């Protein structure tokens, strides 16, 4: 799943090391983890794998919050984990060069001022006085930004990565809801139909135990919204067990572990893009 959604870098931490008496067993677990990483397209030789006990480290810090590096083995392992994360996980770059977009997380009204939509700025920048569009779940609306606030401070401008509240002119609370997006006009449009590449998680990965057919209607989560969609058609990219009846059946079935291309039709329009 991490590979499918585009996670670029990973550090592995094997927890509960204190419950393993045989160190060779820990080495076998690490080898198995690296095999799994390779299976899903990660370069396991370049990925750090560390072990420790989060519980014992926490208990030590609760007992003595002034513990310094070198005072406790389990706390040191957590320090080492964070140092490794700092070294191997790149700092995300703010997408400042792209058009403004914010997915609405919550909406509330301020007496005498108007409607405020809150969320994290996904990309771009926005200034007070800018014109924006509210897109998805209903008809697209155009409005003007009359105020921006972050952590109870008034701003003239917000940029990618900020969690802000945006005051919108002439918009009623009933006109905007969680799952809509606020964007620069003309940069993103609502759709009810799209094609996507899908990997179906197996039971071992926390996914499905059974397959499904064309016409299945699951929930689709996009940014801050979830909406029901119908699988109109699919084609196999790679099957986990291609010899199964799923390929021979007159009504083919998608099984856990399969990679497929799907055409989806949603019951309501949402703002999506490639």
Image (spheres, rainbow, N blue to C red):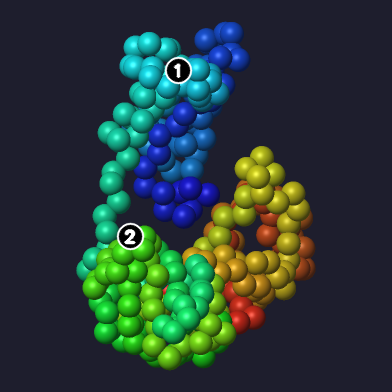
Q: Quadrant of the C terminus?
A: bottom left
Alpha carbon distance from label 2 to label 1 = 35 Å
Q: Secondary structure at mark 2?
A: loop
Which numbered tag is attached to residue 64?
Answer: 1
Q: Which residue is mark 2?
A: 161
Q: Nearer the viewer, mark 2 or mark 1?
A: 1
Q: Nearer the viewer, residue 61 or 24?
A: 61
Which residue is located at x 70 percent, y 51 percent?
208
Is 81 situated left or right of 4 in this image?
left
Q: Is residue 193 left or right of residue 73?
A: right
List x then y, in percent, for residue 182. 41, 78
Q: Position of residue 201 (x, y in %)?
A: 62, 50
Disc with the residue nearer the chain's start (2 vs 1) = 1
- Which residue appears at 38% of the width and 37% of the height? 43
Instruction: Please name whichever residue, 262 or 62, is drawn nearer the observer in this view of the structure.
Output: 62
User: How busy is the neighbourhood of tag 1: few (under 14 within 10 Å), some, or many (20 plus)?
Assistant: few
Residue at point 50% right, 22% down? 62
């Amino acid at each position: 799943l991490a590979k499918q959604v585009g996670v670029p870098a990973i550090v592995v931490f094997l927890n509960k090391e204190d419950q393993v008496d045989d160190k060779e067993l820990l080495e076998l677990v690490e080898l198995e983890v690296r095999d799994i990483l390779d299976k899903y397209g990660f370069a396991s030789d370049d990925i750090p794998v560390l072990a420790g006990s989060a519980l014992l480290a926490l208990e030590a810090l609760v007992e003595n919050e002034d513990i310094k590096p070198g005072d406790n083995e389990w706390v040191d392992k957590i320090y080492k984990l964070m140092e490794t994360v700092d070294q191997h996980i790149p700092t995300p770059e703010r997408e400042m060069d792209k058009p403004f977009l914010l997915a609405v997380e919550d909406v509330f009204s301020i007496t005498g001022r108007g409607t405020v939509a809150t969320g994290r700025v996904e990309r771009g920048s926005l200034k007070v006085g800018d014109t924006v569009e509210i897109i998805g779940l209903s008809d697209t609306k155009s409005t003007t930004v009359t105020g921006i606030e972050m952590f109870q401070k008034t701003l003239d401008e917000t940029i990618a990565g900020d969690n802000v509240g945006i005051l919108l002119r002439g918009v009623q609370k009933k006109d905007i809801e969680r799952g809509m997006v606020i964007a620069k006009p003309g940069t993103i449009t609502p759709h009810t139909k799209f094609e996507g590449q899908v990997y179906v998680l197996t039971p071992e990965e926390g996914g499905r135990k059974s397959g499904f057919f064309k016409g299945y209607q699951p929930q689709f989560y996009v940014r801050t919204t979830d909406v029901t969609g119908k699988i109109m058609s699919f084609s196999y990219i790679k099957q986990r067990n291609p010899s199964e009846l799923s390929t021979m059946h007159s009504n083919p079935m998608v099984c856990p572990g399969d990679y497929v291309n799907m055409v989806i039709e949603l019951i309501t329009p949402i703002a999506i893009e490639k």
